[in-house]
Image: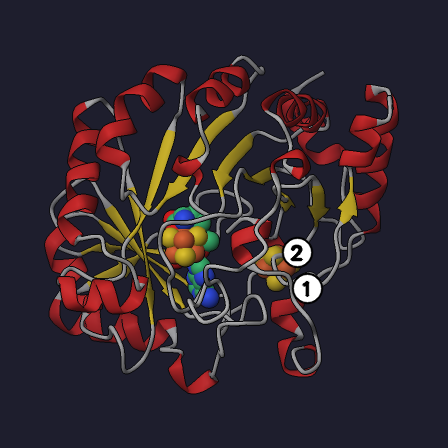
Amino acid sequence: MNDNLLDSTLVDQLQRPLQDLRISVTDRCNFRCTYCMPRAVFGHDYPFLPRPDILTFEEITRVSQIFSNLGIRKIRLTGGEPLLRKNLEQLITQLASLNNIEIALTTNASILAKKAKALKEAGLNRLTVSMDALDNPTFQLMSDADFHVEDVLKGIEEAHKVGFEDIKVNCVIKRGVNDHALLDLARYFKGTAVTVRFIEFMDVGSTNNWQPKEVIPAQEMRDTLHALFPLEPVPGSYLGEVARSYRYQDGSGKVGFITSVTQPFCQHCTRIRLSTDGKLYSCLFATTGQDIRTMLRSGASDNELQQAITRIWQQRNDRYSEVRQIESRNRKKIEMSYIGG
Ligand code: SAM
Ligand code: SF4
Ligand code: SF4
């Protein structure tokens, strides 16, 4: 069957094709970013998932194969901090054996320098590194952990050395906390192969005390950057792309803005998420997931699993970011560290 036909076969209620799978390989993290896992909530006694509840590599690979049959072309490994999952390279090797799937990873890069080579050798195709400041005081204010900007930069450098191209950097901007990271990071990576994407602080989960006044709209970030380094828009390159891309007019690279709050992109959302314990979530802002692990562990055939996943996608009508004003009150949303960012 031709690839395009496959891609367009399975659509949801809003005619959106299923294209991307995000897998949370652990709900644990060595950072406590205030916008994601605030320490007051994710403290010493936080009930992280016990080992038996976590999908094994074999289970993840089996589900991924079924998604591949259904037409997905991209898997992103995330978490929590995915590099904390023991032997992650082994999972990547297994996923790399699936046909025609690009494998990407999002990481805080705290231990990337040590891991980059093994990740590359295992078959990882793309890397996104999160960093919210270029100076240590602000970096630590955002991440609330004892790591340094230098650890992250070393990770990026090592990743380049072992052959990762087009590395992306994600930076969440919170008004009044790391506003200056916008220009710092743009200036630092301008003229390199790294594309920085500035993310609007989102009301994901239920613990980060999100306030609209702490969001800097992407338009404002773009204007600030444009005043210093003139930008021009780059047309979107594929359906489901979440960042609005711009290039520097002087030819020294690109930046992106992820505008989930002020300019939602639900109409083109082609992603599904698999949580660490095997639930499927059809929206980042979901309140409930659909259990796949029970089926996996009770002898369901591939065909039965494929039918269950097909039904989940066909019934999907999520568009939270478009209806945020009405929906956000009273919604008990799942945490991003568990569902996978
Ligand atoms: N630990 C890895 C990392 O930080 O790159 C992967 C998981 S993390 C949940 C994935 C991405 O979600 C990160 O780039 C992070 O900045 C982003 N993120 C988490 N909470 C967010 C929020 N409230 N608003 C915007 N982005 C958020
Ligand atoms: Fe950890 Fe990533 Fe969440 Fe920060 S954003 S707490 S690094 S999972
Ligand atoms: Fe997709 Fe839900 Fe985000 Fe909309 S709010 S873009 S449907 S994950």
Q: In this view, does 268 lie to the left or right of 90?
A: right
**Residue 266 visible (yes or no):** no
Beta carbon of the mark 1 residue lies under 8 A of ligand 3? yes
Cβ–Cβ under 8 Å for marks 2 and 1: yes
SS category of the residue bearing label 2: loop
Residue extending furthest toward the top: 97
The residue under the point 86% across, 31% down is 307
Q: In this view, does 253 lie to the left or right of 66?
A: left
Quadrant (top left/top right/bottom left/bottom right) for the N terminus: top right
The residue under the point 27% across, 55% down is 131
The residue singled out by tag 1 in the image is 319
Residue 252 spot, x, y in % from top left: 13, 48
Residue toward you, 192 or 58: 58
Q: Residues within 10 Å of mark 1 (few under 14, many from 20)?
A: many
Residue 65 spot, x, y in % from top left: 67, 21
Ligand 2 image position (quadrant): bottom left
207 up-or-down from 311: above or below: below
SS category of the residue bearing label 1: loop
Q: How many tags in the picture? A: 2
Residue extending furthest toward the bottom: 213
Residue 53 spot, x, y in % from top left: 68, 38
Q: In this view, does 290 lie to the left or right of 205?
A: right
Amino acid at the residue labelled 1? Arg
Amino acid at the residue labelled 2? Cys
**First-in-chain label (2 vs 1):** 2
Q: Is residue 304 left or right of residue 53?
A: right
The residue singled out by tag 2 in the image is 283
